[in-house]
Image: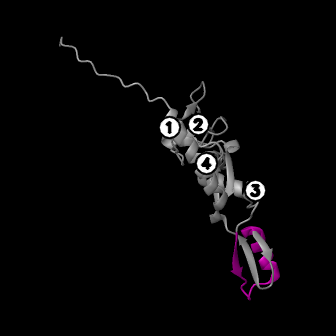
Amino acid sequence: MNKRIGYINLGSYESRRDAEGGLLCLNCDKLITAKRRRRYCCYDCSIEFVEKNSHQMLRSKLIKESQGKCEHCGNVPTKRENRYPHLTDNEWKEIKQFAYIIKFTNEYILLLDDSQLILDHKNPIALGGAEFDRTNLQILCVGCHKIKTRLDQAKIAMFRKTEVPPTQTKLVFSENR
C-alpha cells in the first residue's frame, strides 16, 4: 500500500551530471552554468520543480486555475469582509485583482475562502494513485470532499481485505557454525 509523502525531500534527489561531469538541472536537465547554483539552472526552474512536488504549491496553483470553484458541485466558498471607508475605488480594484474578490459592493466584499477548498486525489494514493500527478488531483469544497472521502475509505477497506499479505520469511539457523 502506498503512503503519502506530502513534501519535497531534496536530499533524496541526487545531483545529476552530464558526460563531462557538469551539473544538470533537476527540472529541465540543462547544464548549470552559474557557480552558486547546485540543483537548478534558474529561479523559474526551482519554482516549477517545487510546484510539481509540493501539495501546498499545487493546491494554490489549482485553486487559481479553477477560479475557486469546486470541481464537483461548482460552488465557490466565500466569506464576507467589510469595506474600509478610507480606500478609494481604484485601490479596491487593485485589491480585487489580488485577493480574488467574488462580489464587490460599496458596503462589503465577498472574498474567496480558500480554506474551504481541499486538494483531493481522484484515485487515492493508498489505491495506487500518483501523489503529485496533476491529472490525479482536483479541488473540492469541504462538503464534496467529505462524501468522496467516505467512498474512498470504503474502497480502501475492501482493498485491504482482499489484499494478499506478503509471505513471511522464516529465519533458518544452521547448526553448523
Secondary structure beneath label 1: helix
**Residue under circle 1?**
160
Q: Secondary structure at mark 4?
A: helix
Q: CA distance from mark 2 to mark 1?
A: 13 Å
Span highlighted in magenta in the image? 78-100
Q: Which mark is residue 66?
A: 3
Most foreground residue, 108 or 17: 108
Q: Residues within 10 Å of mark 2 (few under 14, many from 20)?
A: few
- The dot on residue 128 is 2
Q: Position of residue 4 (x, y in %)?
A: 52, 45
- Tell me where residue 77 appears, x and y as whole percent: 70, 67
Instruction: Quarter of the image for the C terminus: give it.
Output: top left
Mark 3, secondary structure of its residue: loop
Write the residue at 72% across / 69% down. 99
Residue at 50% across / 44% down in the picture?
9
- The type of residue carrying mark 3 is Ser
The amino acid pointed to by label 1 is Arg
State the image quarter where residue 81 is shown. Answer: bottom right
Mark 4 or mark 2, whichever is nearer to me: 4
Residue located at (65% from left, 61% from top): 143
Q: Quick check: 170 above or below 118?
A: above
Question: Badge 4 is on which residue?
Answer: 151
Please identify the quarter of the rendering in which residue 166 is found: top left
Q: Are marks 4 and 1 in contact (CB under 8 Å)?
A: no
Q: Position of residue 63 (x, y in %)?
A: 70, 57
